[in-house]
Amino acid sequence: MTKNEQSKHSVLSQWIKENVANGNFSVGERIPSENELAKKFGYSRQTVRQAIGTLVSEGILVREQGSGTYVSILNRKSSVDKTMRIGVITTYLDDYVFPSIIHGIEEILTEAGYTMSLGITHNKPRNEENCLQQMIQSGVDGIIIEGTKSALPNANEKLYQKLKEIHIPTVFINGYYNNYSDSYIVMDDAKSGELATDVLIQNGHKHIGGIFKSDDLQGLKRYEGILKSIKKHNFVVDDTSIIWYTTEDFNYLFEGSMDTVILDRIKDITGIVCYNDQVASALIRLLKRNNLSVPDNYSIVSFDNSFLAKEMVCNLTSVIYPSNKIGKKAAQLILKQINNPLIAERIKIEPSIKLRNSVKKLNI
């Protein structure tokens, strides 16, 4: 199947799902034939057959030889079969944004009579695999998950397919896997990156660099926003001043031995967009030990508006990450999906920014 056929197959599968979810195709009803669907969408019979086959494997449709394809009686758990437990898998659990996410999830789940089973991956695919397997074995009614290394190919694709087959819904937070179509709730990270860069440009900065995480989707999307802002203002992106790192590289990048390399990479810029407040804080420490300061020598804009961004810590201009709100919305969405497994919502939250004193106004 070509990439174009795969896209058509996904469009048709989603259209059928939506019609089942909203009652246009009711349980037990025959859906249009392959010929009818091919004519309606202008697709080949092979593409239609593949789309229907996928929904049959997911238990949404059932084929009856010589009769047609029908909406199956979904294998929804009855109230007596429910575990009343939701799995929550995050990359970390420390004093950064994650406790507030967890509190938001817990508040909504507790109100609905659910408990929470927590797993931590430390952004390692093998740990994510173990968490998913444990939750499948122990039994949960749904899973809220922050994907591991979401910018890379999904290392646990087979496990996610198994979740579909046994009708355990998932809701992704912060990022999502591009080849997995379930629900997610994320910041609009591309707009966030554009907003952060706009602040620097509005204060007279024309030479802008950045430090971004390369193995998480958030890093790629925030960088995408930088590109959009810089090109919108007819400036040129200085690729040498964009520093990329992976999860495993963070401590090595900022422990001291790389200071000369980093300072050489940013020597021709005045403004820096950092992947998050943690990176911005580490960069500020690096500058201080090299007799440089923010904002006198470099202006910095960051993401998350965490405790690290506060005036008494790093005094960072930072894009606000509504962690508690995201936790609550994720919990509300997983409960909706438990009641109707065909629901798939993809929510992007519009960004806003907290202005502090980490950006110097240059003479224009």
Image: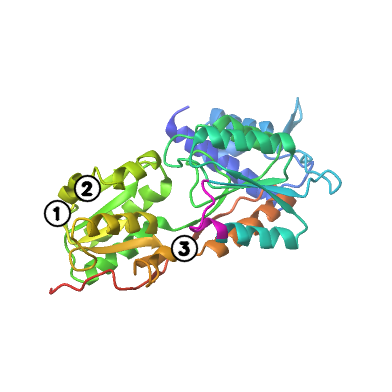
Q: Nearer the viewer, residue 161 or 67?
A: 161
Spatial CA span between label 1 and label 2? 12 Å
The residue singled out by tag 1 in the image is 267
- Magenta span: chief secondary structure: loop
Q: Amino acid under label 2?
A: Asp
- Label 2: how many Cα within 10 Å (few below 14, some 14–19, many 20+): some
Q: Residue 48 versus residue 345: which sits nearer the camera?
A: 345
| Residue 156, magenta (yes or no) | no
Tell me, yes or no, if residue 74 can be seen here: yes
Identified at 17% across, 64% down, the residue is 297
Apparent side of residue 261 relative to residue 10 in the rendered image (left or right): left
Looking at the rendered structure, the secondary structure element under dot 2 is helix
Badge 3: residue crowd in 10 Å (few <14, some 14–19, many ≥20): many
Range covered by the magenta-colored residues: 91-99
**Residue 70 seen in the current view:** no
Name the amino acid, label 1.
Answer: Lys
Measuring from the top left, give residue 157's x and y in whole percent: 55, 32
- Tell me which numbered mark, 1 or 2, is placed earlier along the sequence: 2
Q: Name the residue carrying label 2.
A: 259
- The answer for how far apart the CA atoms under marks 1 and 3 are is 30 Å
Residue located beneath label 3 in the image: 321
Tell whether position 92 is magenta.
yes
